[in-house]
């Protein structure tokens, strides 16, 4: 019930943003971030707030400080709505940095402390270290998980998936319906056949 098929990972990311970023919610992302997210932010009319990076991507201490400052600016309540944290834990675009298990757990802990939602862009998950848990596995109650087939299989196969937190699954379905009635059936048939025959 929480898995939504989309027309590629970028579409899944757009649906996640449309669902999570309500009421002027601030979006915190790596100081260098995926150009597609910048495009979504500009189109939707909100600002991205850069968080310092190190050799594993977003720094938990810098995120904690940014979220703390955001809450303080709102007089103890989140200023502009519940904060959203956008991260790419595997092969971050454009730096190609990846988070280890401890870094993932630390990012989740900071988001739980500040009750921030997470949008995890995991389109490169096929290249992750074996048994590396996605943030969505560590924090399913607050994480939107975005993936797709075009980055890991074929650029022309525009199938993405969004796994929404259970409490926001209906809102994500509404956001999906507002932008697209269905994923291309031929793409779905190709995906189904290739999964079935092992391609």
Image (spheres, rainbow, N blue to C red):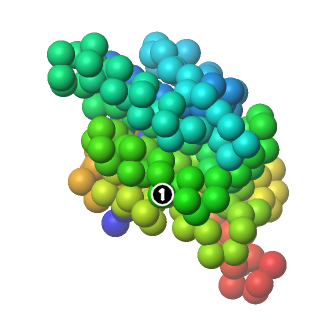
Q: Where's residue 101, x and y in %?
A: 58, 63
Q: Where's residue 108, x and y in %?
A: 42, 51
Q: Can residue 102 be seen in this view?
A: yes
Left or right of residue 80: residue 6 = right
| 123 or 54, nearer to the observer | 54
The answer to which image quadrant residue 42 occupies is top right
Q: Residue at x 64, y 59 (%)?
A: 100
Q: Residue at x 65, y 41 (%)?
A: 57
Q: Residue at x 43, y 63 (%)?
A: 138
The answer to which image quadrant residue 159 occupies is bottom right
Q: Is residue 29 above or below residue 60?
A: above
The answer to which image quadrant residue 20 occupies is top left
| 92 or 113, nearer to the observer | 113
| 75 or 170, nearer to the observer | 75
Q: Residue at x 76, y 63 (%)?
A: 127
Q: In this view, does 70 lie above or below 88?
A: above
């Amino acid at each position: 019930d929480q898995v939504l098929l989309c027309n590629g990972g970028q579409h899944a990311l757009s649906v996640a943003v449309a669902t999570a970023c309500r009421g002027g919610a601030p979006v915190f992302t790596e100081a260098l971030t995926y150009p597609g997210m910048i495009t979504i932010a500009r189109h939707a009319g909100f600002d991205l707030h850069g968080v310092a990076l190190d050799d594993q991507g977003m720094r938990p201490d810098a995120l904690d400080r940014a979220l703390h400052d955001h809450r303080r600016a709102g007089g103890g309540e989140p200023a502009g709505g519940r904060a959203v944290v956008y991260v790419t834990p595997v092969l971050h675009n454009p730096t190609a940095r990846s988070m280890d298990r401890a870094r993932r757990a630390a990012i989740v802990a900071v988001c739980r402390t500040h009750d921030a939602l997470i949008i995890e862009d995991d389109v490169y998950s096929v290249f992750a270290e074996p048994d590396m848990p996605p943030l969505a596995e560590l924090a399913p109650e607050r994480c939107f998980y975005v993936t797709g087939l075009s980055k890991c299989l074929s650029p022309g196969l525009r199938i993405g998936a969004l796994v929404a937190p259970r409490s926001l699954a209906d809102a994500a379905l509404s956001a999906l319906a507002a932008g697209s009635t269905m994923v291309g059936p031929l793409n779905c048939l190709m995906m189904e056949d290739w999964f079935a025959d092992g391609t």
